[in-house]
Amino acid sequence: PLTNTTYTVTVTNGFTCTDTEEIAVTVNANPTANVGNDTSICINQSADLQGMGAGDYLWNTSATSTTITVSPLVTTTYSLTITNPATCTSTDEIIVTVNALPTADAGIDVTICYGKNTALTANGGTSYSWNTSASTASITVSPTETTTYTVTAVNAFSCTDNDDLVVTVLP
C-alpha cells in the first residue's frame, strides 16, 4: 500500500465458527539522500563532499560521516546511501572530475649585462601571472641584480602550475 492500511481477514470453518484477525501495515517514508551537484578539481587537490538527509550515512568509501574529503587521481563517482530507522534507503551519486595541471614553462635561465633588459616568455597555460605583477605571457625585465622570476600558468580548468627562471646580472 502507499499509505498506512489495516487488513482484516475472517475465517469460517464448517461449523460456522469464525475468527477475525487484523494486521496494520505501516508505510515508512524513504529518506532522501542528496550529495549536491557534480564538481571538478585539479589533480593533487581535494574536494569536500557534503551529504544531506536524515538517517545513517554510508559512502562507497566506507565512511559513515555526513562530510568526506576526497582526493582522487582520476575522475571518480562517489555514492552515499542513507538508511532510516525503518531500514528504508536512498542513494545519490556525485562525480568528481579531475582536471590536469598545465605545465608552466618560464624558459631557460638568462644572463645579461648590468643595465640591459631581457624578454621572458612563458608557455604551457592559457593565462599567466608573474611575480612582477604582470599578467601577460611575455614580459621585459631589467634587473639590477640577479633575480628569480616566477610565472604561474593557468589552464582552461583554472588549474595552476609554477615555474622559475633566474636572470643573472653581470657587472
Image (cartoon, grey):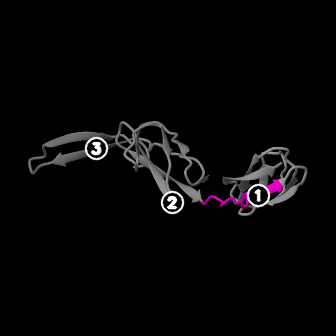
Task: Tell me if residue 108 is in the magenta stretch.
Answer: yes
Residue 56 in the image: state x and y as whole percent: 39, 38
Q: Alpha carbon of mark 3 to alpha carbon of mark 1: how far?
A: 93 Å
**Residue lying farthest to the left in this orientation:** 15
Q: Alpha carbon of mark 2 to alpha carbon of mark 1: how far?
A: 37 Å
Residue 166 in the image: state x and y as whole percent: 73, 52
Q: Is residue 136 above or below residue 51?
A: below
Give the magenta-colored segment's residue range.
Answer: 100-112
The residue that mark 2 highlights is 74
**Residue lying farthest to the front in this orientation:** 171
In the image: residue 45, left or right of residue 30: right
Mark 3 or mark 1: which comes first in sequence? 3
- Say what amino acid the circle numbered 3 marks: Thr
The residue that mark 3 highlights is 8
Q: Nearer the viewer, residue 16 or 148?
A: 148
**Residue lying farthest to the bottom in this orientation:** 123
In the image: residue 127, left or right of residue 3: right
Q: Residue at x 44, y 42 (%)?
A: 29
The residue that mark 1 highlights is 110
Mark 3 or mark 2: which comes first in sequence? 3
Q: Nearer the viewer, mark 2 or mark 1?
A: 1
Q: Hey, which quadrant is residue 128 in on the image? A: bottom right
Q: Nearer the viewer, mark 3 or mark 2?
A: 2
Residue 170 in the image: state x and y as whole percent: 81, 51
Q: Nearer the viewer, residue 11 or 119?
A: 119
- Prevailing SS of the magenta stretch: loop
- Say what amino acid the circle numbered 2 marks: Val
Task: Tell me if residue 5 is in the magenta stretch.
Answer: no
